[in-house]
Amino acid sequence: KKYLELCSNSCSAEIRYAGFLFLSKDFSGALTMSSQVRQHCDPNNALPIRISAYAYYELKDYSKGLTEIEKLFETVPADRRNAKDYEYHGKLLIALNRDSAGIEMLRSAIGLDPSRAELPSELASAYMKMKDYQAAIQVYEEKKSSGKDLKVADFFNLGKCLYSVGRYTAADSAFIRV
């Protein structure tokens, strides 16, 4: 609050403050601040819409989050969207059981930022939810071959997928790494 007072409550300062609240995991505060910004500043500014969409996901209010992220996708041209936009869109869709569309969004996020090691794990989890174990195995193998380290949870999930498709020896090798 002191930050806002020092910045004369300007719209850009309020947007930055909403971003700070989100980054500090005060998602409710970030939502409140971003809605205030949208009321008395530009309602089509992408940053408060983005913060709202992300915060709704983190608060597990997936339907409102999806509404916000779709509003963001209408407002922001495709060349100005970032990997997190596609990631959150995908996660929201998957949370609302629209797995195929969510997978496409996660693939887009990976295409925009292949350095993010957690995105392939999210994608593989989505395939596992759909019981498409072969696709999940392929994602984990691509992750491993791209030089990204698999985490313990990745080896465990890879082992479950391999076991589910009858590749017991390979599953055992994955489980040993857990």
Image (tube, rainbow, N blue to C red):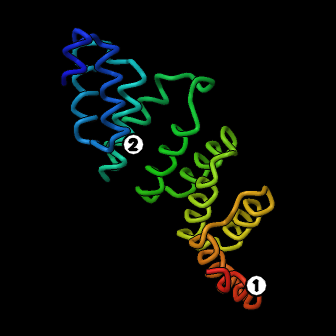
Quarter holding the N terminus is top left
At label 1, the amino acid type is Ala
**Regarding mark 1 in the picture, which secondary structure is present there?**
helix
Q: Residue, x 35% and y 26% (percent of image)?
A: 48
- Residue 165, given in percent of the width and then of the height, sits at 70, 83
At label 2, the amino acid type is Leu
**Regarding mark 2 in the picture, which secondary structure is present there?**
helix
Badge 2: residue crowd in 10 Å (few <14, some 14–19, many ≥20): many
| Residue 127 falls in image quadrant | bottom right
Q: Residue, x 58% and y 38% (percent of image)?
A: 83
Q: How many marks?
A: 2
The answer to whether residue 119 is above or below residue 124 is: above
The answer to whether residue 163 is above or below residue 86 is: below
The answer to whether residue 68 is above or below residue 93 is: above
Q: Residue, x 53% and y 69% (percent of image)?
A: 129
Q: Nearer the viewer, mark 2 or mark 1?
A: 1
Closer to the chain start, of discs 2 and 1, is 2
Query: In the drawing, does residue 31 fall left or right of residue 12?
Result: left
- Residue 34, given in percent of the width and then of the height, sits at 28, 27
Query: In the drawing, does residue 56 fall left or right of residue 85?
Result: left
- Residue 171, given in percent of the width and then of the height, sits at 70, 85
Task: Residue under label 1, please give it.
Answer: 170
The answer to whether residue 126 is above or below residue 11 is: below
| Residue 163 falls in image quadrant | bottom right
The label on residue 77 is none
The label on residue 66 is 2
